[in-house]
Image: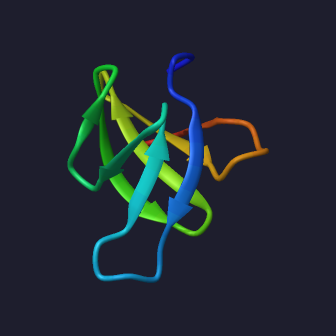
Amino acid sequence: LNKVSVQGIIWGVSTPQAIINDKVFTIGDSIEGAQILSIDKRGITLSYYGEVFDLPSPGQGAMRKDVK
């Protein structure tokens, strides 16, 4: 996930999008082996090798979600 840089979020539309590594992605797309699960105004949620991560909107750090 170190290679994934969220540069912007487009939300509040019928198809939310994220600008990541200079490309536009939507929910369900894959990047660097991770699948995008959701996109909202706070950032994106990815599934990466069985773990779920939140990548916040630009200017904030990444956090791992504890899934039970």
Q: Position of residue 62 (x, y in %)?
A: 65, 36
Between 22 and 68, the residue placed more toward the observer is 22
Q: Would you say 35 lies left or right of 17 here?
A: left
The colouring scheme, among rainbow, by chain, secondary structure or one colour, is rainbow
Image point (32%, 45%), residue name: 36
Q: Position of residue 28 (x, y in %)?
A: 21, 49
Q: Is residue 56 above or below residue 9?
A: above
Q: Position of residue 2 (x, y in %)?
A: 57, 17
Q: Would you say 18 lies left or right of 62 here?
A: left
Q: Would you say 25 lies left or right of 10 here?
A: left
Between 2 and 7, the residue placed more toward the observer is 7
Q: Quadrant of residue 27?
A: bottom left
Q: Residue furthest left?
A: 28
Q: Residue furthest right?
A: 59
Residue 68 visible to an observer of this rendering:
no
Q: Is residue 18 above or below residue 22?
A: below
Residue 7 visible to an observer of this rendering:
yes
Disc tally is 0
Image point (47%, 39%), residue name: 20
Q: Would you say 11 lies left or right of 55 here?
A: left
Image point (25%, 34%), residue name: 30
- For the C terminus, the quadrant is top left
Q: Is residue 37 above or below residue 33?
A: below
Q: Residue furthest front?
A: 22
Between 31 and 49, the residue placed more toward the observer is 31
Q: Position of residue 46 (x, y in %)?
A: 39, 41
